[in-house]
Image (tube, helix red, strand yellow):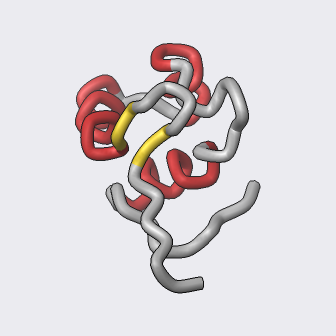
């Protein structure tokens, strides 16, 4: 699917470019991110992106990811 750019948790309006440094500085896991920021705790659509962000350091995703 072209034209897609997933760059943030929409429920919390938290850009991944802001979330990644927080997570790295504090050595957060996905569960920590959810607990500390609320990202991934509401609709959950950002969870696979946050998971991949934590693994790879990517903050912009051009494909749809699912749990």
Q: With respect to residue 6, does 28 lie above or below?
A: above
Q: In the current view of this chain or complex, which residue is farthest to the front?
A: 3
Give residue 56's quadrant in the image.
bottom left
Quadrant of image for the N terminus: bottom right
Q: Residue at x 55, y 49 (%)?
A: 51
| Viewer-nearest residue: 21 or 7 | 7
- Furthest toward the right, the residue is 67
In depth, the one of 32 and 7 nearer the eye is 7
Q: Is residue 42 above or below residue 1?
A: above
The answer to whether residue 64 is left or right of residue 37 is right
Q: Residue at x 54, y 53 (%)?
A: 49
Which quadrant is home to the C terminus?
bottom right
Q: Position of residue 11 (x, y in %)?
A: 56, 30
66 up-or-down from 33: above or below:
below
What x and y, as percent, mark residue 63?
55, 74
In this rendering, position of residue 33 left or right of residue 57: right
The residue positioned farthest toward the top in the image shown: 36
| Residue drawn where x is 52% and y is 23% of the image | 32
Closest to the observer: 66 or 57? 66
Q: Residue at x 39, y 32 (%)?
A: 14
Residue 58 is situated, as x and y percent measured from the top left of the image, at: 35, 61
């Amino acid at each position: 699917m072209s034209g897609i750019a997933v760059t943030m948790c929409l429920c919390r309006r938290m850009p991944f470019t802001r979330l990644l440094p927080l997570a790295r500085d504090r050595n957060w896991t996905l569960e920590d991110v959810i607990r500390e920021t609320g990202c991934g705790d509401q609709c959950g659509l950002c969870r696979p992106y946050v998971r991949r962000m934590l693994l790879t350091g990517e903050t912009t995703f051009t494909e749809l990811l699912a749990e």
